[in-house]
Amino acid sequence: MTCEELIAHLSSYLDHEMDAALVAEVQEHIARCRNCRVVLDTTQRLIVLVHDEGRRVIPASQRSALFERLQQAFLNRPQTLENSNLRTAEDSAV
Amino acid sequence: MPGPTIDLTVYENEEALLAGLRRRDPDACACLIKRFAPLVYAQAIRLLGDADEAEGVLQQTFIKACDKLDTYEGRSGLGSWLYRIATNEALMHLRQRSPRVGLDDLAETIQEDEMPQRLTPWTFDPTTAALNSELRAILEQALAALPATLRVVFVLRDIQGLSTEETAVALGLSESAVKVRLHRARLRLREMLAAYMQEH
Ligand SMILES: [Zn+2]
């Protein structure tokens, strides 16, 4: 397996979507290739890092203004539900 | 001017909140907002890479959710349901933003210039250390710098944790296209973050 081939297969390897024969080839390659070992390790770190970041929400300091505008937009929203109910009633009356 | 004042303790749990929503309890939607808006907004900003557009998606998501409560079947949690609405809204925005560059219009192979260039190990270990605000900002910039076609796949798969199949369905892509894009997004993000990591 060449470095290019390893890089092309990197995600399949990390996502465990690779058959056993190829997994063995990947492991053999990274055992002797420092560069690919680094790419594999740092990509793995990236995945862990963003996964944890996914549970993060916006900072409290930004929240109150955002909520206020959301609340206003919500209170001023067009009454689509009532409108659509009305329309359905008219349609069925015809 | 004071912010919205909502007593969260009125609804003890998701079930009570849902019952309130179904009764059209005026406080219930406000409570829904307070509980889930931070999550929905964070998802929208990741998908869109733009704070103003994300705020628009946030507002549309909650307006739609509260007006279409009767379509909520309660099989997934309220959070997942809202996530799904927000994701669809955000994808609609992306399609409107560049209607000619469809979300499926992209070379599906690894380009030569996408081969890893930065080959220094990272000292930062996400399994033991939390992101500091500087690194978090770097990550957000890197995400925003990705083309939308790659970003949405990365956000759904690696951040939101959807499966390849779920992502393919959500985006109307083949599973193999999802895999290739995820791979390209990871390589590009790794490269962008590596620039920071090797200096720290
Ligand atoms: Zn190699």
Image (cartoon, rainbow, N blue to C red):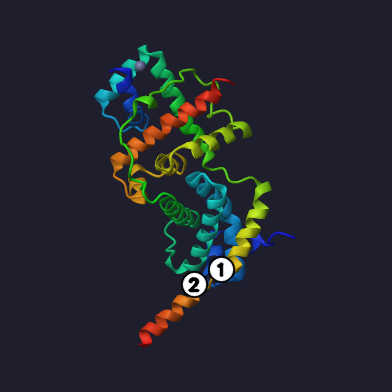
Q: State left or right for residue B161 relative to residue B165.
A: right
Q: Amino acid at mark 2?
A: Thr
Q: What's the CA distance linking mark 1 and mark 2? A: 8 Å
The quarter in which the N terminus of chain B is drawn is: bottom right
Camera-side residue of B105 and A94: B105
For label 2, the residue is: A80
Is label 1 in contact with label 2 (beta carbons under 8 Å)?
A: yes
Q: Is residue B78 above or below residue B128?
A: below
Letter of the chain that mark 2 sits on in the rendering = A
Q: Amino acid at mark 1?
A: Arg
Secondary structure, mark 2, is helix
Quadrant observed for ligand 1 in the rendered image: top left
Residue at the left extreme of this rendering: A21
Residue B168 x, y percent position in the rendering? 33, 46
Camera-side residue of B21 and B133: B133
Residue A8 x, y percent position in the rendering? 32, 27
Residue at 55 percent across and 59 percent down: it is: B59
For label 1, the residue is: A77
